[in-house]
Image (cartoon, rainbow, N blue to C red):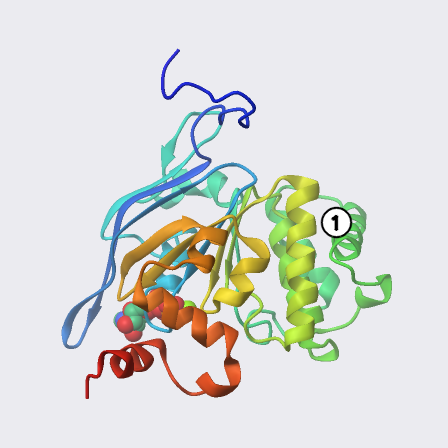
Amino acid sequence: MSGAPAKPGAAAPEVGGPLLEVRDLVVEYATANGKVRAVDGVGFSVVKGGCLAVVGESGCGKSTIARALVRLLTPTSGEVLLDGPAGRQDLARMNERRLRPIRSRIQMVFQDPYGSLDPRMTAADIVAEPLKLRGVRAKADRERAAADLLDRVGLPSSALQRRPAEFSGGQRQRIGIARALASRPEVLVCDEATSALDVSVQAQVLALLNELRRESGLTYVFISHNLGVVREVSDEVLVMRAGRVVEHGPTATVLASPREPYTRALRAAALDPTTMRGRKPRDVLATAKGAP
Ligand SMILES: Nc1ncnc2c1ncn2[C@@H]1O[C@H](COP(=O)(O)OP(=O)(O)O)[C@@H](O)[C@H]1O
Ligand SMILES: [Mg+2]
């Protein structure tokens, strides 16, 4: 036996390692004024079926992490390890040819349901497109699968032939989720997936994500600037500030007793949207410290 002895009555230890592990991730952008280090040595891991939330205010590097995970960008350094039948593979520096068969395993749901769907395509076509890539050749099979996927995210069959403009924001986000699911991913990276939605619609989409996780064992990296939203979905939370991790732990613990003043400010922003409106956690911190 290795590792710590199991406590009687404790949950069975995790079999195998995490499904996704990120080590010492660094991402720099080249700009006219030189390099910007948007992500600076971030590490975390997520077990299969788990949900890790990444929180922090605008500009702290959340979307950059998301884009690195799904390899919309190539990290400057660090590892993005995805476990699978072929063992752990590092996606961070993999070339496009080797990435292609792996891309379906880790999919992104984007923030903006308005901008991320092609306005000229019907919902059926949007959801069926990844099925083509997956090699579903017959049109009738793709149509049937698209109808099933839309049903799974709670849209009626009448939605199939409608275009994005004919849907509400919440419905559009459901289409975005169905499109991501069409690739049969193991990991969904949700980047502010509910942030553009009204509070009640947001709750419905969060419920859908939770249901998908329970039913299909999906693994999530859930990115949000709102700690209140994170509470609804995540087991663990990573708090980011200026490209670095400032706090990391079980969601319940971090929310109940945040160690970092920055996390406390984020929590205040999530809990009290009226008095905090228009104020950023860094400003609240500055005030609390008596800084000018
Ligand atoms: N394409 C880019 N070129 C240069 N700088 C960028 C680019 N994308 C993001 N940044 C900068 O990187 C930092 C992190 O951005 P981002 O990951 O979008 O943060 P978040 O999603 O937390 O709001 C910010 O300072 C942002 O201005
Ligand atoms: Mg972002």
Identify residue for label 1.
142
The x and y percentages for residue 157 are 85, 61
Give the side of residue 211 with respect to residue 44, left or right.
right
Q: Quadrant of residue 291?
A: bottom left
Q: Residue furthest top?
A: 1
Looking at the picture, does residue 17 appear above or below residue 62? above
Q: Quadrant of residue 59?
A: bottom left
Give the side of residue 193 with respect to residue 158, left or right.
left
Q: Nearer the viewer, residue 55 or 30?
A: 55
Give the side of residue 12 with respect to residue 162, left or right.
left
Q: Residues within 10 Å of mark 1 (few under 14, many from 20)?
A: many
In which quadrant of the rendered image does the N terminus lie? top left
The x and y percentages for residue 251 are 48, 53
Q: Nearer the viewer, residue 15 or 249?
A: 249
Residue shown at 53%/66% (left/top)? 228
Q: Nearer the viewer, residue 83 or 289?
A: 289
Number of callouts in the render? 1
Q: Is residue 178 visible?
A: no
The x and y percentages for residue 199 are 64, 75
Give the side of residue 107 with respect to residue 138, left or right.
left
Residue shown at 48%/22% (left/top)? 7
Looking at the picture, does residue 231 appear above or below residue 115? above
Q: Amino acid at mark 1?
A: Arg
Residue shown at 33%/64% (left/top)? 61
Q: Quadrant of residue 83?
A: top left
In which quadrant of the rendered image does the C terminus lie? bottom left
Q: Nearer the viewer, residue 94 or 87?
A: 87
Location of ligand 2 given as a quarter of the image: bottom left
Disc 1 residue lies near ligand 2 with CB under 8 A: no
Q: Is residue 87 visible?
A: yes
Secondary structure at badge 1 equals helix
The x and y percentages for residue 14 are 49, 27
